[in-house]
Amino acid sequence: KISALSIFFAALTACQTPDPGITSFSVQSDEKIDRLMPRLVGLAGKCLAGNGKPFPQYRVSSELNSLSGQPRILPVRRDDTQGLPGLVILGQVQGSGTSLSVFGLLLGVDSPGSAVRNVGAWAAGGKDCA
């Protein structure tokens, strides 16, 4: 016999937030880091952050002259520019090209597919929003 309490817990379990899925990914580019990263800053501003974009409450900040030699692109909340970035696009020299590591909370919320599609396309040489 099924009790009302069993039905309640089954319904509660079904209503839980699903796993956000992708929390990080990496992609390789043949483009040199000193050319790729500045291009990605412009594309991230054009395609990801701002009004009418997948992450409207964010703006793009960058640290291209990093002392660590690993430049970063950091979408940060417009109302908390000193806070933690919602996404990190980290560039690292890999042979004659660049390895991009992407991670952050925005991969699991709002429009997660947008960041994955765009960064992947840009690493392959794309110049538009995916």
Image: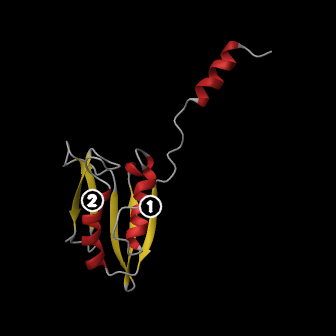
Q: Is residue 61 left or right of residue 10?
A: left
> Which residue is at a point 52% across and 50% down the rendered structure image?
21
Q: Which mark is residue 46?
A: 2
Of the residues shown, which amino acid type is indicated by label 2?
A: Lys
Q: Secondary structure at mark 2?
A: helix
Residue 82 location in percent, x, y?
19, 49
For label 2, the crowd category at 10 Å Cα-Cα, with few meaning under 14, some 14 to 19 and many 20 or more, is: some
Residue 7 location in percent, x, y?
68, 19
Q: Secondary structure at mark 1?
A: helix
**Residue 105, relative to residue 72: is it above or below?**
above
For label 1, the crowd category at 10 Å Cα-Cα, with few meaning under 14, some 14 to 19 and many 20 or more, is: few
Q: Which residue is mark 1?
A: 117
**Residue 91, relative to residue 74: is it above or below?**
below
Quadrant where the image shows the N terminus: top right
- Give residue 9's quadrant in the image: top right
**Residue 38, relative to residue 89: is it above or below?**
below
